[in-house]
Image: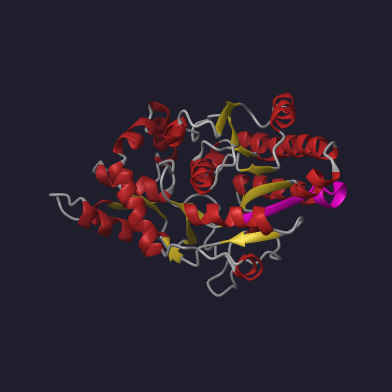
Amino acid sequence: MILVTGGAGFIGANFVLDWLRSCDEPVVNLDALTYAGNLENLASLQGDARHIFVHGDICDRELIDRLLAEHQPRAIVHFAAESHVDRSIHGPGDFIRTNVNGTFTLLEAARGHWMGLDAEAKAAFRFHHVSTDEVYGSLGPNDPAFSETKTYEPNSPYSASKAASDHLVRAWHHTYGLPVTTSNCSNNYGPYHFPEKLIPLMIANALAGKPLPVYGDGQQIRDWLYVTDHCSAIRAILQAGKPGEVYNVGGWNEKPNIEIVHTLCALLDELKPDAAGSYRRLITYVTDRPGHDRRYAIDARKIERELGWRPAETFETGIRKTVEWYLANQDWVAHVQSGAYREWLDKNYAGRS
């Protein structure tokens, strides 16, 4: 039995689905079902006894204590987080509450549970914390990619809150001995991605004939990781990762945002052509976000060297699978594009054109 937090969100849901495709070990899935948490992501698990969903908050210590006592998980995989930079700029308080206070609450509950285990279970227990490359700050054009020893230089309320949570996880290991591991990943993409992020937003807007908003000059560079590759990396860390260690997880796919948008337009032109012409006609440059980091890149050699992990997907194979999934799952997209979602997009992009 493992406990997953945030398992109805984009990466968390993909992890739960991938886990139960790979093995029969049950999952307790704790999610608060805030705007990006969506039970439709887990619809294929309905009636599956291996999946126990709990609607709840990681800040609820009483609930977490009860779940740990009842289910006795051998590991906690902690995805639950507020995760969108733009939202953190508009409302940083939620990010501090969930990402910092929530992680603290979870660590304290895990420590109490772990302290009560017998020697064998105690040695086998793991707390895995899922984090981001954004904690490292921004890179110049010729800087080496982020390694695990890169200093932390977060530049947004989101990345600062994740940096704080990373430091808490590290401290609970060094102070209390809690057997933790941390992964810092690059930009994920793939199925079930909430359509406020670059790739699903561009697909959704293109299909609706709406502008494709590109921040600034579109030359911000990100390293792209297909979500199921991220899931396999976490499984590798759970299986063989060393307590106290950090593992960077990347796809070896550095690309500027405008190239991503051009690639998506070309795939949509091929797979769902528009009589009005190429989707590239919809590209619209808008005012850049405040403090927008220029470049991220992950050096993933440590996890390859120590755990034998490498991504299975190239960007070309992963992005085609992603576009095909969205075209085949338009009902899912329509359901998540609620009134609240549309109001958020209007708020974020108002006045940027």
- Residue 180, given in percent of the width and then of the height, sits at 74, 50
Residue placed most toward the observer, 154 or 111: 111
Residue placed most toward the observer, 341 or 185: 185
Does residue 353 appear in the picture of this structure?
A: no
- Residue 34, given in percent of the width and then of the height, sits at 53, 30
**Is 102 a magenta residue?**
no
**Is 179 a magenta residue?**
yes
Q: Residue at x 48, y 58 (%)?
A: 225
Q: Is residue 319 left or right of residue 296?
A: left
The correct choice, above or below, for 7 with respect to 33 in the image is below
Figure quadrant of the N terminus: top right
- Residue 132, given in percent of the width and then of the height, sits at 60, 53
Q: In this view, does 43 lie to the left or right of 149?
A: left
The correct choice, above or below, for 121 with respect to 242 in the image is above
The correct choice, above or below, for 63 with respect to 256 in the image is above
**Magenta stretch?**
173-184
> Extreme left residue here?
275
Q: Residue at x 84, y 36 (%)?
A: 116
Q: Residue at x 52, y 61 (%)?
A: 294
- Residue 147, given in percent of the width and then of the height, sits at 65, 67
| Image quadrant in which you'd find residue 27 | top right
Visual colour scheme: secondary structure
Q: Is residue 320 left or right of residue 147?
A: left
- Counting labels gives 0
Residue placed most toward the observer, 241 or 337: 241
Q: Which residue is drawn at 35% across and 35% down?
A: 332
Does residue 4 appear in the picture of this structure?
A: yes
